[in-house]
Amino acid sequence: MTLAEHLSRPFSHWMAGEGADADVVVSTRVRLARNLRGYPFPEYLREDMAQRLLDQVSAAVEVLGAEWDVYRLGEVDPVDCRVLVEKHLISPQHAQERRFRGIALNSSESGSIMINEEDHLRIQVLEPGLGVDTALAGASAAEGALGGRLDFAFDEEKGYLSACPTNVGTGLRVSVMLHLPALTLTGQAPRVWVALRKLGIAVRGLYGEGTDAAGDLFQISNQITLGPSEAEIAAGLVQVTRQVVEQERHARGLLITESRQEIADRVGRAYGVLRHAHLISAEEAMRLLSDVRLGVESGLLDRPERQKLNELLVVTLPGYLDRNAGRPLGRKERWALRAQWIRERVA
Amino acid sequence: MTLAEHLSRPFSHWMAGEGADADVVVSTRVRLARNLRGYPFPEYLREDMAQRLLDQVSAAVEVLGAEWDVYRLGEVDPVDCRVLVEKHLISPQHAQERRFRGIALNSSESGSIMINEEDHLRIQVLEPGLGVDTALAGASAAEGALGGRLDFAFDEEKGYLSACPTNVGTGLRVSVMLHLPALTLTGQAPRVWVALRKLGIAVRGLYGEGTDAAGDLFQISNQITLGPSEAEIAAGLVQVTRQVVEQERHARGLLITESRQEIADRVGRAYGVLRHAHLISAEEAMRLLSDVRLGVESGLLDRPERQKLNELLVVTLPGYLDRNAGRPLGRKERWALRAQWIRERVA
């Protein structure tokens, strides 16, 4: 599959709107950090070694089957890289310094491997809904297969070595993207974050570390990678996630019973504006899409379906808009194109 | 026709959305003030004389034919009186002090006669669009027919006498209701008002003297009633109105060519909110209906049609909502019912 094919379609496997607890959990990501023995971590890699490592990993990816392709970011346009970030297939950091970096992708985009990001390999699997077990199984299978071709740096005591100490051990990060409009609207979110942090759970914005939460979407993930087993880490995050899901559902229920008209008004107005606006910023779109999602999940609106809402999280972003317009858009052009796409898709 | 029949339907003849220049001129009103010889003006009428005058005028109205009925405001519920005001069939002042006052109405509501308002009779005809000639002919015909039964106070020098000196002479007031969103939006409206006032034209709000302009709707009318003939007064107001209409059309044209996306966005959002909101204030409804009307008249929206927009000016008002709910509504109930009716009607 060509990279252009990946980039021109909005859909990614994680957007399917399926899976457990999909009324609150948009998607699940499992990531395994791995490094190759005999190479410094990417930050300290000389260019010739970085190139060699990229070649070596690219060749190894063949073991994963014909579903997978490797793309070298040095040959990829910056706008295309931005779309990969917007689709959550690579990190913002990976898109910034593209030389000697790569990404392996399978055709459904459920699996992606960043090469020469902070670690030599970051194997990630994205699933719709709360799909930690499936995602972990997928990531472990890919890691196992690649491990037959690559010599991962492993220490009997510390486990898998990684560039950042917070990833040493299992190299595992499990994160879920949660839609928490009711906890936000009722002002309960900050209290929930405090509780989560005490449990060793990190709360982050939409594109990971250092990014803002937008559209009431948050990512929560395990902080600790060393000590517990992969299964324990995964189970812990699932347990915490289910508690947050229940709190969000409870808050939604209260809103609907105690402020039904106000909520119907809020989600109706959001739908009406998205359906009929001709100029819209990314920030406003995210905010209104959150209201519409709450409306759909609460039965106050009968459309659009979850998958369309998930796709709208991506197609309304600058990179995707610019790429599909075929050129860098001015601010107003972009607002107009965004509004046009939203009008067509929320109908 | 019973008063209840008049009050339960939103439609009045003036809302038809027809007539000349209906893209800017919502409606035309012609009013003739008349007083009966041998009676003090209403303000100074003793109760028994007020009653006698009401009886006498009510009997005289029979000459206008079976289309006409007289209703005594003393027997009319205050909420029903409020609806008569909202439909522009009586003045706010007439609804306030209801004893010994009456209203004669024809079935289409094109004609109404207030009895014992500021003058003994205020004969008015309402037409859709710029229909000054038709309205004046209708009012004059009614006045002539009533004059065969009633002895109107007339002075060879001053003309028809009236309670307020500003109505002496012809007793004629011609007023047009104009929708001027583009002059308002572009900030030109104040300059237009200054010019109109220099020409002896009064600019008033939606319900006449002392009321606010809402929804970019304004009433302009002649100030001078003594001196020029009725035909001259009418022709003068038509001429001035046509100038304002041209200015508004020019301003709309500029907006559409120079800020098409912004205007499309504005009217689209207004439509979307009206189509999907669940709680809405009268003020916001008026504001958004103005934007939607601009959108329809500019070809940016293909619905709702003018008549529905005119009806919405009335059905969203407190009196009409309360009356049709069958009880006085609380604020939030009224906002909800208003939103419901608008949702149904703008679709």
Image: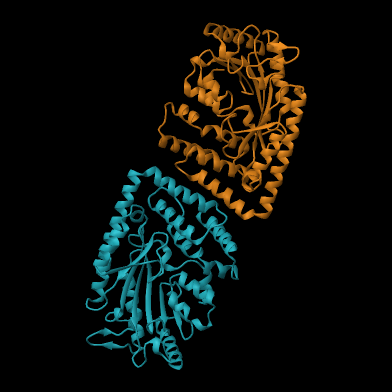
Chain colours: A cyan, B orange
Q: How many marks?
A: 0
Q: Nearer the viewer, residue B170 or B317?
A: B170
- Up-down: is B159 above or below B291? above
Q: Position of residue A168 (x, y in %)?
A: 28, 81
Residue B315 in percent (x, y) is at 52, 32
Looking at the image, can residue B79 be seen?
A: yes
Q: Is residue A116 above or below residue B209?
A: below
Task: Please tell me which residue is depicted at 65% across the width and 42% down the height of the picture.
Answer: B189
The foreground one among A161 and A21 is A161
Say left or right for A191 vs B89.
left
Residue B192 position (above or below residue A57): above
- Drawn side of residue A173 relative to residue B57, left or right: left
Spot occupied by residue A318 in the image (x, y as percentages of width and height):
52, 67
Using residue B178 as the reference point, say whether residue B228 is left or right of it.
Answer: right
Where A309 sits versus B197, above or below?
below
**In the drawing, does residue A155 fall left or right of residue B234?**
left
